[in-house]
Image (cartoon, rainbow, N blue to C red):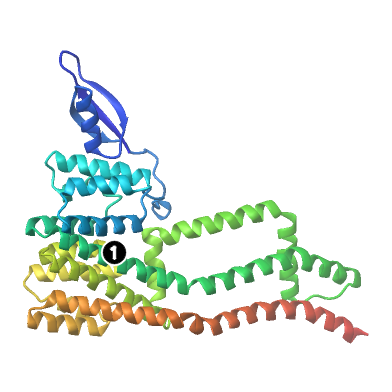
Amino acid sequence: MKFRATIRNEGMPDQSRIIEAPSRFAVYDQIQKEGGMVVELQEVTSKFKMPAWLNVSIGTGVKRTEIIRMARNLATMLGAGLSLSRSLSVIERQSGNKRLKAIATGLSDSVKKGSSFHEALGAYPKVFPKLLVAMARAGEESGSLTDALTVVGIQMERSDELKRKIRGAMIYPSIVITAVIIVGILMLVFVVPTLTNTFTELKVPLPFATRAIIAISNFMVGNVALVFIGLIALVVSGIAFVRSRRGSDIVIAASLHLPVIGELVRETYAARASRTLSSLLSSGVPVLEALAITKEVVYADAFAAVVSEAEERVKKGEALSVSFAEHTKLYPILMGDMLSVGEETGKVADMLKQIAEYYEGDVAEKTKDLSTIIEPVLMLLIGTVVGIFAVAVIQPIYSLSSAF
């Protein structure tokens, strides 16, 4: 990160310069060691802005698994009686990631200077999720930081595990579709031109499907570089679009209307919202703040809107379960019913945890069978592609044989 700092030294006019550092705290520390004082500090951002659908985060240099491991290790060391600053020093020495080492050092320095742990974490908003910051604050305020870090570690781990299972289930169809596309391109580039020459020499009347395939083949053969660049651009822009906020919302909205997939999406977001709310409420975070954080963790606009509505209704004195019970097209009916029971018994956090565990287990089971469910669809797709190509090639040959 780069910062523009206005620095004041005794007996000298104020100076402004650009400083590269992992955080604001590191800038203050560096200037203090140089004998100066920071008068003004601003983060330097690029003037160039990409379109919203291409504005995708490249990365922070720290993997989510490393953040989870850090939270779990901190909880273990704090539980063993180590101080927070010493625990962070151990994290810094153990980590093999240079970026995480620098962040751990910055966190340790901030804590030693009197900052609270959640304030130190908040200085790295692109690295540490708001859920972790909020849980750390709740833990510090209640005097149970160890328990809060343990809970948030489990929450993030379960969330990542759910993502991995869903991604794993999509590997098989992705490979099949990619193989079909590659084989189709090879056929158009190498096989069709040979057939085209044969049809031209024999002056065979060609149906529309054959003429269309030949036209595509001729274009691809004559513009190999353009087609290659176009395919790369299409793949890159497609990945960027899907990873963007807007693209993700469109994909999710479309997925909700698909059989099996739609139910899987609903249960995945129900599990994520329930697990997040349960973790926050059980750590002592006020319900309104917990809903505000859950809204950001849920991420998808359609599902986040329900959480936002619940937040507004709770402000007016209504029950938390009302909004979830009214939006059964997004959140399953069971979630609203169980949440209502939790409110009646005064065990909302426990009930949310049970909801999360139920849907996490259900999603895990369904993802195991997803490949079996998708397989007939893939076979139908492959059969359609092969059938179109076969008809386009065989029909002219059949016409030729009939002429004789």
- Report the number of numbered marks: 1
Give the image quarter of residue 339.
bottom left
- Residue 97 visible, this angle: yes
Residue holding disc 1: 156
In percent of width and height, residue 358 lies at: 27, 81
Q: Secondary structure at mark 1?
A: helix
Q: Establish if 231 lies above or below 281.
A: above
The kind of residue tagged 1 is Met
Q: Establish if 153 lies above or below 169.
A: above
In percent of width and height, residue 324 lies at: 21, 77
Of residues 394 and 84, the one nearer the viewer is 84
Left or right of residue 37, residue 182 in this image = right
Q: Residue extending furthest top?
A: 11
Left or right of residue 225, residue 28 in this image = left
Left or right of residue 213, residue 142 in this image = left
In percent of width and height, residue 263 lies at: 36, 81
Give the image quarter of residue 142.
bottom left
Q: Quadrant of the C terminus?
A: bottom right
